[in-house]
Image (cartoon, grey):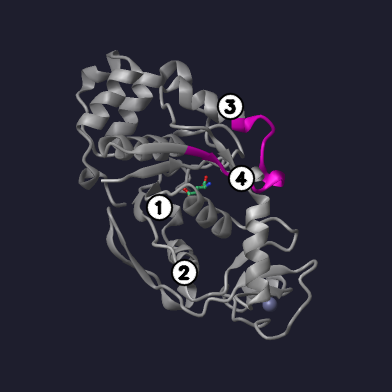
Amino acid sequence: MRYIGRFAPSPSGPLHLGSLIAAVASYLDAKANQGIWLVRMENLDPPREMTGADQLILEQLQAFDLQWDGSVLFQSERLQAYQQVLDNWLTNKTAYACRCPRKQIRASGGIYNGHCRHLNIPVKDSAVRYLNLYPQTEFKDRIHGKVIIESQRASEDFIIRRRDGLFAYQLAVVLDDIYQNVTHIVRGQDLIDTTVWQNALYNSLHKTPPQYAHIPLIMGEDGRKLSKQTGAPALDCSKSTSLLVEVLNRLGQNPPAELKLESNKTILDWGIKNWQLNKVPNH
Ligand code: GLU
Ligand code: ZN
């Protein structure tokens, strides 16, 4: 089977346990399927980035012996490609400019109602939305099976370029996964709902969407998703072996306890050899 997978961190800070799980799960799934594992730095949003976090993340991956294939793609190198698609879509009316304030959308239920679809608002200083004429409402997930997304949300005209001029994750992720020929995506469950938006973009570009597996998130003590924004602690790379074994446990793989006395490489090799996606918990 042809398999190209990837891990796509945003350099808003160093990896934490939640992002390490996504890294390890995508790595093991790729390697267990004789696949290629790419790393892509999703540095699309400078205001939310931390200087040097990109290098830190790569060093952390290496400290865990998570060696990627090929060279790292930085989204900051891809702006022209995004712009080209955006321009095409604006020209052929697959996308349109919108200046509705976020507050107003929130006040009317949080789902954008297509207000600016036919208003021909100038693009400059506007957000750009995808005209979601053929919304996808469901997809098959390798962990969750059939995932059905509420149709109002699924058919929203979502933002592909923000009003401040930055490209939106939804657009960049699809264009990059196509560009890198990614066939399998293993990532956190927080991205499950907008997968249908991404699939709508694949269809629009006449490309087959990849296969998806969404892994459970780690919750912090406050019950929120562990993330850089909620102040998740950085990983202690000097404890890499026990962290890797903890990750294997959280992924439902049941590693033998003695495994943490081994090297990272031995632990990862055990993980590859024994990888069972169907044991990954779905919540
Ligand atoms: N860059 C995204 C994040 O760090 C992940 C994107 C993806 O895996 O599709 O949350
Ligand atoms: Zn609008």
Identify the mark at residue 200; answer none if there is no mark: 2
The residue that appears at 41% across and 58% down in the rendered structure is 192
Q: CA distance from mark 4 to mark 3?
A: 17 Å
* Mark 4 to mark 2 CA distance (whole Å): 21 Å
Q: How far apart are labels 4 and 1 at the CA level? A: 22 Å
Looking at the rendered structure, which numbered label has been put on residue 75? 4
Q: What kind of residue is marked 4?
A: Gln
Q: In the image, residue 105 lies at what x, y percent? A: 64, 74
- Categorize mark 2 by other alpha carbons within 10 Å: few (<14), some (14-19), many (20+): many
| Image position of 260 with respect to 99: above or below | above
> Which SS class for mark 2?
helix
Which residue is at 72% across, 85% downward?
Answer: 119
Say if the magenta span includes residue 242: no
> Which residue is the site of mark 3?
56
Q: Is 47 included in the stretch rendered in magenta?
A: yes
Q: From the viewer's perspective, is residue 260 above or below residue 133?
A: above
What residue is disc 1 on?
A: 189
Q: CA distance from mark 1 to mark 2?
A: 19 Å
Q: Nearer the viewer, mark 1 or mark 2?
A: 2
* Upstream in sequence: badge 4 or badge 2: 4
Q: Earlier in the sequence, mark 2 or mark 3?
A: 3
